[in-house]
Image: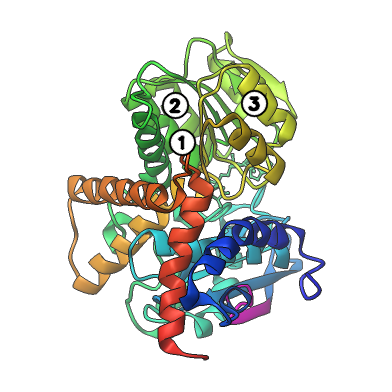
Amino acid sequence: KERNGQEPEFLQAVEEVAETVIPYIVQNDIYHGKNILLRMVEPERVITFRVCWVDDSGEIQVNRGYRIQMNSAIGPYKGGLRFHPTVNMSILKFLAFEQVFKNSLTTLPMGGGKGGSDFDPKGKSDGEIMRFCHAFMGELFRHIGHNTDVPAGDIGVGAREIGYLFGMYKKISNGFTGVLTGKGMSWGGSLIRPEATGYGNVYFAQKMLETKNNDIKGKNVVISGSGNVAQYAAEKTIQLGGKVLTLSDSSGYIYDEAGIDAEKLAFVMELKNVKRGRISKYLELYPNAIFVKGETPWSVKCDVALPCATQNELNENDAKTLLKNGCICVSEGANMPSTKEAIAVFHKAKILFAPGKASNAGGVATSGLEMTQNSLRFKWTREEVDNKLKDIMSDIHKSCIEYGKDDDGYIDYVKGANIAGFVKVADAMLAQGVV
Ligand code: NDP
């Protein structure tokens, strides 16, 4: 706390892990007296750099770039890049810290990292995005590599940005390697990677519901966000017979009582990924829906809630409202979307609650599969990757039960994910000595 007092999101993420992992350390002699958690909360390396680029009016713009190389005990640093004006050291350190545990849970050999910039892609032309990405990679390239650190996308960094970043990396490194994941299908990308985080989240929700002999089929599902994760969480929900009632962006949410079906979702994907418009435009084509400005969708009655937008978007009051309205399952697609107080409400009511580091791990897991395919110079089919993704989500679910089942049978997925993620990284760190 003394060292990181100015970093509230990072402290929030660390506290949540510490509360469940410290009692485990106390019960297990091999981790005693090794300051293992203290070592895990200190990044192995933090890089910040200047990113200068020229906008369309010829003016020179300056942004700050970051890469947090948090932990490489079990593999190369791995984690996304976020381009958003709210990006700062606290946000990126929380994301990098969570990533270490999440990557460990996937069972694949990946360490944890995160990076990005305070650059705001909203309203920028394609040319400006390209020049920014090229400038950003002009510095980042010296710190990454397919065996060192393999970034991916996150908020504000999708297929377009990964393309520009990869183009510059390839040019200045003079090599075609799997240094980034989320690449296009014709140049090293993996099938199912775009879908993986959203699909994986729904697979995880389904696994949780199965523990109650329940199913997502026929359930009313409320989703926040309308970006990559939200879109594919919606797609998989629809495929499995659930009814998607809402989507949102930072301007508010849309509620479609009739359900957002495959055709309506295709419109949202076009609106968000191609036209880069606001979610309220949904009403122009589907006037029976409503748009609620500036609000999150948690007051809409549902059985299942999938927060897929951003951190701390679901607070204690939202959690109480969800419960009051009969919600039985919350599976986080975003990173840390629920506040600590909200999680306490879910736990007290003993409903199914999955933290992002377990339920959204499908994205990075499939990035791991992309790295494997790049190393093999081989491409698996859509079905092969999807089956591997399902198996990984199922294994993560099993790990959560192994470490998270309380004496009364309630599965505390937060505890389960934290301890399962911790054990593998801690064991590797102990084996490698004090380095
Ligand atoms: P996108 O940029 O594709 O979409 C983000 C969505 O969240 C947009 O609808 C955006 O609205 C909304 N949003 C962003 N910031 C805010 C905010 N401050 N307040 C309200 N809404 C906001 O990002 P992704 O879908 O990739 O990421 C969403 C979440 O999932 C993040 O927490 C990310 O870290 C996490 N995640 C993503 C993975 C991936 O594979 N992409 C993997 C694991 C986790 P607007 O357009 O108005 O900004």
Kind of residue indicated by mark 2: Leu
Q: What residue span does the magenta drawing correspond to?
A: 40-49
Residue at 49% across / 75% down in the picture? 29
One can see residue 212 in this view: yes
Q: Position of residue 416 (x, y in %)?
A: 46, 52
Label 1 near ligand 1 (CB < 8 Å): yes
In the rendering, which numbered label is found on residue 265? 2
Q: Is residue 186 left or right of residue 286?
A: left
Q: Nearer the viewer, residue 19 or 381?
A: 19
- Categorize mark 1 by other alpha carbons within 10 Å: few (<14), some (14-19), many (20+): many
**Depth-wise, is mark 3 or mark 1 nearer the camera?**
3
Task: Judge whether residue 43 is colored magenta.
Answer: yes
Amino acid type, label 3: Trp
The dot on residue 55 is: none
Residue at the spot of label 3: 298
Mark 3, residues whose alpha carbon is within 10 Å: few (<14), some, or many (≥20)?
many
Callout 3 secondary element:
helix
Q: Residue at x 37, y 84 (%)?
A: 174
Please name the residue that numbered disc 1 is placed on. Answer: 231
Q: Quadrant of the N terminus?
A: bottom right
Tags 2 and 3 in contact by the CB under 8 Å rule?
no
